[in-house]
Amino acid sequence: MRQTQIGSSGLEAGSLGFGCWRFLGHDLSHAETLIETALDLGMTLIDTADIYGFGDAGFGAAEALLGEVLAADPARRGRMVLASKGGIIPPVPYNSSRAYLIEACEASLTRLGVEQIDLYQIHRPDLLTPWEEVAGALDTLIADGKIGYAGVSNFTVAQTRALQAHLGARIVSTQPEFSALHLQPLEDGTLDWCQETGATPIVWSPLAGGRLGEGYTPQADDPGRLAELHETLDRLAALYDAQRSDVALAFLLKHPARPIVLLGTQRPERLRAARNALAIPLTRQQWYSILETSRGEPMP
């Protein structure tokens, strides 16, 4: 699989990664199969967060299950780039104070059963903590060896720059929602900032919560352009003997910011099938046709 360097970190991961936001409720055997399948396919970025599992499964459940998978075969740790996030604590909802972030990271390390998290990202911006305090927490975690590198998630470009102004380390990643249906990172400067600084966009919800997958029928509360977007993706999929979801992923992977695209499927066969996206050489015209359909208007 094509490898992508994560910002200035020196870490490399496959351009498709495995996201653990639905990594819940499995027995250990199935959880091991999912992680092993991802790693064998070259999906070496394994992304989780302390909040994944909140609700019936309990805060930290996804990290705890991943920790069991790592404990079952410690060699897996060396095969992955391990990423986690902190800063959300329901019902607060956000806390990026120095004390809390350090406490949250240490709790994640315990659940995961590891000494260091390769990439630790602030999950969402806390509007009540000064950026210099957030930066101080991250710099301390790096200095103490508890995290390797720092990133952000769901931040605006202005918020990211404000944090970077106080941070000794470089921000190596940002994690936005991005799909052929959700174009905000193309329009709000996020992907431009990534190319400006060399940071890596790590994309979540690349299939718009399944709405760009096979068999999905547009619902009354879906954007009106979804049916037309399905038609465009299906037309291109037929040209490449591929699936709609393959083309939707290829649309993201073609962007020059070199995103890492996270897959949240809990089915090993779907992880294997997603590799087809890497072999789809969308032309410039085809890529823009997807963009124009999603926007509902031609490029100016």
Image (cartoon, rainbow, N blue to C red):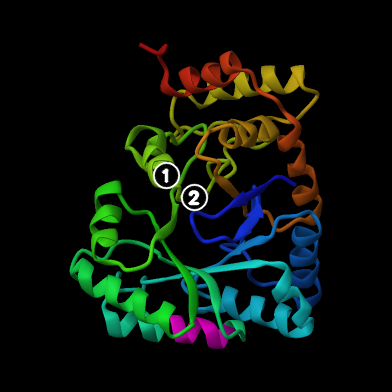
Q: Residues within 10 Å of mark 2 (few under 14, many from 20)?
A: many
Q: Which residues are magenta?
A: 105-111
For residue 205, side relative to residue 275 (left or right): left
Residue closer to the observer: 234 or 200:
200
Relative to the observer, which residue lies in front, 210 or 185?
185
Q: Is residue 95 visible?
A: no
Looking at the rendered structure, the secondary structure element under dot 2 is strand
- At a point 69% along the width and 60% down the height, the residue shown is 44
Q: Relative to residue 269, is residue 224 depicted above or below?
A: above
Q: Is residue 77 left or right of residue 198?
A: right
| Left or right of 111 on screen, residue 98 | left
- 50 displayed left or right of 155: right
At x 75%, y 51%, the residue is: 271
- Label count reads 2
Q: Choose the circle earlier in sequence order: 2 or 1.
A: 1
In the rendered image, residue 57, in percent from the top left (x then y), is placed at: 56, 76
Q: Quadrant of the C terminus?
A: top left
Question: Measured along the vertical axis of the image, is residue 274 above or below residue 219?
Answer: below
Identify which amino acid the numbered label 1 is placed on. Answer: Cys
Q: Which mark is residue 194?
A: 1
Disc 1, SS: helix
Q: Which residue is mark 2?
A: 200
The question of residue 29 being in magenta is answered with no
Marks 2/1: CA–CA distance: 6 Å
Residue 63, horizontal then vertical, whole percent: 58, 76
